[in-house]
Image (spheres, rainbow, N blue to C red):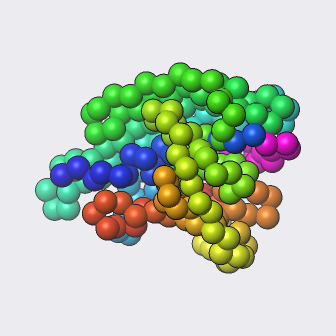
Amino acid sequence: MRLLGLAIGFATAFAMPANALSLPSSGQLNFDVMRKGKDIGEHSYQFSGSETAFTVRVSTDVVVKVPLIRTTAYSFKHSSIETWKAGKLQQLQSATQDDGEPHQLSTAGKGVLPASLWNDDIVKSGTLMNTIDGHIMNIRVADLGMERVPVKSGNVTAHHYRLSGGLERDLWYDGDGNLARVAFKADDGSTVTYIRK
C-alpha cells in the first residue's frame, strides 16, 4: 500500500524573497509526525549562521506500518540544505527516498521561497518551490486568525493559515513567526500532523 501524497507533505518547504527572516533562538525546530494517533516519524530544522547569511538543514524520516502485521506500508526520507543570504534563498540541495524511489535536486533560488514551511513569509507568496523536484507551485492563502494549539510543551497562541492550490496545508506560526504545527490530508483520507516538541 502506497500512501500517495505523503511525500509532498513531508518534504514540501516553500521559498520567496524576504526582507528580515526570523530564525528560532534555539537554532532548531523539532516535530513529531503523527497519523491516526500514532507517532510515525520526525521532522526537524537546524539553523546555523546569522540572520543575514545562514543555512537551514531539513530532515524528515517517516515510516508507516501496517497494523497487526507491522510490515512497512510506506517510508519517506528527505534531507535538504537551504543556503540563504540577505533574506533570499541562494541554493537548495536535497535528497529524497520516497518509498524507495530516489530523487536528487540541486538548484538556485529562482526568486521564490522553498516549501519547507519554517518561514512564515510563505503566506505572502503566491508561488513556492517544491523541495523534492524543484517545480514551482501556485498557491492561495487563507488567513484563519489566531488560535491556541497544542505542542509538546503545552499550548501556544498561533496564527492559522490554510494553503490551497498547488499545495494544501494548514500551518500555524507562533508569535515569533516560528512554525508551531502543520496538518494535511494524505491520499487515504487520514490526517498527518506535525506537532512541535
Magenta segment, prevailing SS (helix, strand or loop) = loop
Q: How many marks?
A: 0
The quarter holding residue 80 reads top right
Where, quadrant-wise, is the C terminus in this rendering?
A: bottom right
Q: Is residue 25 above or below residue 105?
A: below
**Residue name at image x 31 percent, y 43 percent:** 75
Task: Please tell me whether residue 23 belongs to the stretch shown in magenta.
Answer: yes
Residue 83 visible? The answer is: no
- Residue at far left of view: 69
**Residue name at image x 81 percent, y 47 percent:** 22
Identify which residue, 122 or 39, lies in the foreground. 122
Locate residue 164 relative to residue 102 in the image: left or right.
right
**Residue name at image x 49 percent, y 54 percent:** 167
Residue 146 visible? The answer is: yes
What residue range appears in magenta? Answer: 18-28
Locate residue 45 relative to residue 187 in the image: left or right.
right
Residue 164, image x and y in percent?
Answer: 52, 61
Residue 72, image x and y in percent?
Answer: 22, 47
Locate residue 102 relative to residue 139 in the image: left or right.
left
Q: Is residue 107 above or below residue 51?
A: above
Q: Is residue 38 above or below residue 20?
A: below
**Residue name at image x 33 percent, y 48 percent:** 63
Task: Please tell me whether residue 5 belongs to the stretch shown in magenta.
Answer: no
The quarter holding residue 162 reads bottom right
